[in-house]
Image (tube, helix red, strand yellow):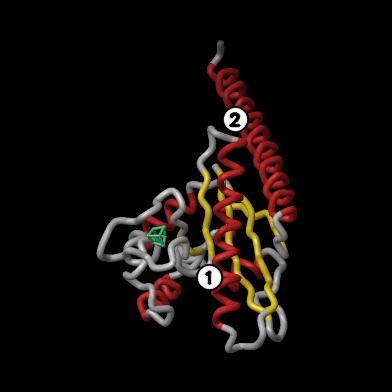
């Protein structure tokens, strides 16, 4: 075959493969959306990798340790990895879904209500990732939650290995994503009214 014909066939095959992958990602997103809605998620939006932008200042917030989990949770910085590695990992996914959960709390001092909402939110992200993995075993899946892992009452870090690595979940912020920019890039609000707490997670697929 003449070389220009070989190139034309190869480029056409690439186009077909791209269309096939895009159609598959759209199907997977619709499934995540349905499962998340059935589980009671407040909002679900499709994202692609162009929205997975990381920022050094987000890592700086982690280092400032206002939450107290820096170095105290196996899925938080610095244990999670170097910022460049995390950015590369995010960029290796085609896209997925952003899920936001808005929960009523008694008032801005209701730390118990906030913590319960965060753990429930992260549990939803774990379940969604498990559903995608079960339905699409050939695909890589990454679930991201809000804040520290929260699977165990107290994280074993740094004194002993993780108790349940298959349940461990990192935070959207831990990967260097700016939660506010991420939700706003999906047309969602970062804050959602008085006496509410909003948590954001993601399920990424490749
Ligand atoms: S599963 Fe438990 S030990 Fe492992 S990171 Fe999560 S909270 Fe820590």
Residue at image location 70% in from the left, 59% down from the top: 44
Please state which of the two labelled residues, at mark 2 or mark 1, is closer to the viewer: 1
**Displayed quadrant of residue 162:** bottom left
> Callout 2: few (<14), some (14-19), or many (20+) C-alpha neighbours within 10 Å?
few
Check the picture and name the quadrant holding the N terminus.
Answer: top right
Q: Residue at x 59, y 30 (%)?
A: 14
Q: Quadrant of residue 194?
A: bottom right
Does residue 201 lie above or below 107 as drawn?
Answer: above
Q: CA distance from mark 2 to mark 1?
A: 33 Å
Q: Is residue 190 above or below residue 158?
A: below
* Residue placed furthest toward the top: 1
Relative to 35, 200 lies left or right: left
Give the left or right position of residue 162, taking residue 18 as reference: left
Q: Which residue is mark 2?
A: 14
Dot placed on the residue nearer the N-terminal end, 2 or 1 = 2
- Front residue of 164/197: it is 164
Residue 9 position within the rendered picture, expressed as x and y whole percent measured from the top left: 61, 21
Q: Residue at x 53, y 53 (%)?
A: 143
Q: Position of residue 175 (x, y in %)?
A: 45, 62
Residue 1 left/right relative to 156: right
Question: Relative to 116, is 4 above or below?
Answer: above
Secondary structure under the numbered disc 1 in the rendered image: loop
Secondary structure found at label 2: helix
Q: Residue at x 47, y 57 (%)?
A: 169
Question: Which quadrant is home to the C terminus?
Answer: top right
Q: At which x and y percent is residue 133?
A: 56, 40
**Nearer the observer, 149 or 56:** 149
Q: Identify residue for label 1.
A: 178
């Amino acid at each position: 075959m003449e070389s220009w014909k070989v190139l034309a066939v190869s480029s056409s095959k690439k186009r077909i493969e791209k269309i096939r992958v895009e159609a598959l990602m759209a199907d997977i997103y619709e499934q995540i959306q349905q499962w998340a809605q059935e589980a009671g998620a407040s909002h679900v939006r499709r994202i692609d990798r162009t929205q997975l932008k990381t920022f050094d200042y987000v890592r700086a917030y982690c280092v400032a340790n206002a939450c107290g989990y820096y170095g105290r949770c196996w899925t938080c910085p610095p244990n999670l990895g170097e910022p460049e590695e995390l950015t590369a990992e995010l960029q290796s996914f085609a896209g997925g879904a952003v899920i936001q959960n808005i929960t009523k709390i008694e008032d801005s001092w209701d730390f118990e209500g906030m913590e319960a909402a965060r753990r429930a939110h992260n549990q939803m992200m774990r379940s969604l990732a498990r559903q995608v993995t079960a339905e699409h075993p050939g695909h890589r899946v990454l679930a991201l939650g809000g804040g520290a892992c929260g699977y165990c009452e107290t994280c074993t870090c740094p004194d002993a290995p993780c108790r349940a690595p298959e349940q461990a979940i990192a935070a959207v912020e831990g990967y260097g994503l700016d939660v506010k920019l991420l939700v706003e890039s999906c047309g969602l609000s970062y804050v959602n009214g008085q006496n509410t707490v909003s948590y954001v997670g993601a399920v990424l697929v490749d």
